[in-house]
């Protein structure tokens, strides 16, 4: 199929793009990487009156380290993030997870902002940004605002982004050493969206006890799901095999998966239990290694 007719604009400055969004109100769509939007256009599941192509706004593509955090422009390609030495050193969880995003052709075009705004709860980047405790900088005609993942991701394919706003930047805090990390995913084929995925960060104190942790699940609810009971269980304790099993069980209990052609709800819950334990095992091993 072919898209329904639309007007096409290609601004070169952010303010120009914002003016176009405001002028067309709810009838415009932003084109960044296009890996999610173009299929929707071709199948006529999306019928915007205007397409605003922001690929010429080069100021939105960057990776900077700044005061204990990483700043990533909303138009930064997946492949740029995947190959970034700064990301690999300061945020290895992102490097590990982004290799699961589509295939190399998709990562060459797809952008971090586009993935987050699309807000598929089975996607890797929303899961990782939630696990890291990141923030999204949204820019609109009435100024800027910063929102956290739990505010930004509202429901399936739905965010707090206003129709006149653009996701300009993602800010990721740098977790201190010795933090261990793991990203586990199961999908029908490599490159597909996750049936279930788990992102884990594990920070140990001087006694090799859990000082802080973050466990986020994908594919088992309308948004990335933070396993808060599992995190609370680990805090202040030595992370044993038994404790990891219990944490996996709590994560499975707190998940809210649905059944589809890729797997039943019961199957997904069992995978949450198994994969959370595996992710904690890997994160613990890396944290112990980093502590040496």
Image (spheres, rainbow, N blue to C red):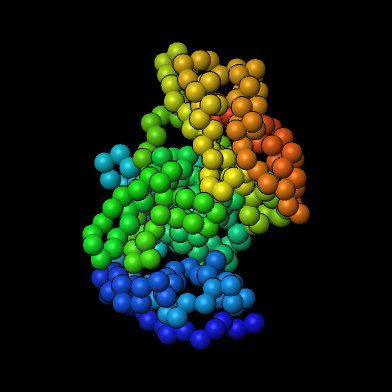
The N terminus - image quarter: bottom right
Q: Is residue 269 above or below residue 151?
A: above
In the image, what residue occupies the spot 23% across and 59% down? Answer: 143
Q: Nearer the viewer, residue 182 or 256?
A: 256
Residue reaching furthest to the top = 207
Residue at 45%, 59% (x, y): give it.
117
Tell me which residue sits at (44%, 69%) in the image.
32
> In this orientation, which residue lies closer to the viewer: 12 or 25?
25
| Residue 149 place in picture, x, y as percent | 42, 46
In this rendering, position of residue 21 left or right of residue 37: left
Residue depicted at 69% across the width and 37% down the height? 269
Instruction: Let me know if residue 262 appears in the view.
Output: yes
Give the farthest residue toward the left: 143
- 31 over 284 or under it: above or below: below
Relative placement, left or right, of 38 versus 52 is right
In terms of depth relative to the viewer, which is nearer, 151 or 73? 151
Q: Position of residue 38 (x, y in %)?
A: 55, 73
- Residue 255 percent coordinates (x, y): 61, 37
**Where 128 falls versus 161 (above or below)?**
above
């Amino acid at each position: 199929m072919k898209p329904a007719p639309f007007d096409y604009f290609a601004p070169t400055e952010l303010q120009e793009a914002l003016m176009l969004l405001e002028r067309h109100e709810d009838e415009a769509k932003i084109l960044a990487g296009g890996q999610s939007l173009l299929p929707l256009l071709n199948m006529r599941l999306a019928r915007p009156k205007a397409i605003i192509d922001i690929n010429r706004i080069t100021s939105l593509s960057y990776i900077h380290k700044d005061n204990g955090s990483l700043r990533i422009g909303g138009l930064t390609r997946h492949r740029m993030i995947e190959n970034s030495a700064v990301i690999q050193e300061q945020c290895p969880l992102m490097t590990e997870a982004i290799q699961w995003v589509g295939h190399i052709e998709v990562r060459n075009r797809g952008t971090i902002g586009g993935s987050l705004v699309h807000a598929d709860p089975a996607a890797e980047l929303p899961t990782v940004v939630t696990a890291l405790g990141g923030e999204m900088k949204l820019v609109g005609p009435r100024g800027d605002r910063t929102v956290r993942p739990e505010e930004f991701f509202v429901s399936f394919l739905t965010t707090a982004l206003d129709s006149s706003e653009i996701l300009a930047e993602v800010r990721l805090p740098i977790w201190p050493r010795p933090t261990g990390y793991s990203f586990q995913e199961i999908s029908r084929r490599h490159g597909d969206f996750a049936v279930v995925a788990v992102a884990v960060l594990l920070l140990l104190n001087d006694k090799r006890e859990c000082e802080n942790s973050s466990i986020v699940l994908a594919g088992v609810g309308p948004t990335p799901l933070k396993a808060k009971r599992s995190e609370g269980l680990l805090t202040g304790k030595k992370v044993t095999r038994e404790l990891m099993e219990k944490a996996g069980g709590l994560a499975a209990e707190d998940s809210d998966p649905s059944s589809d052609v890729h797997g039943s709800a019961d199957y997904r819950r069992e995978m949450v239990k198994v994969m959370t334990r595996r992710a904690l095992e890997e994160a613990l091993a890396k944290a112990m290694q980093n502590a040496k």
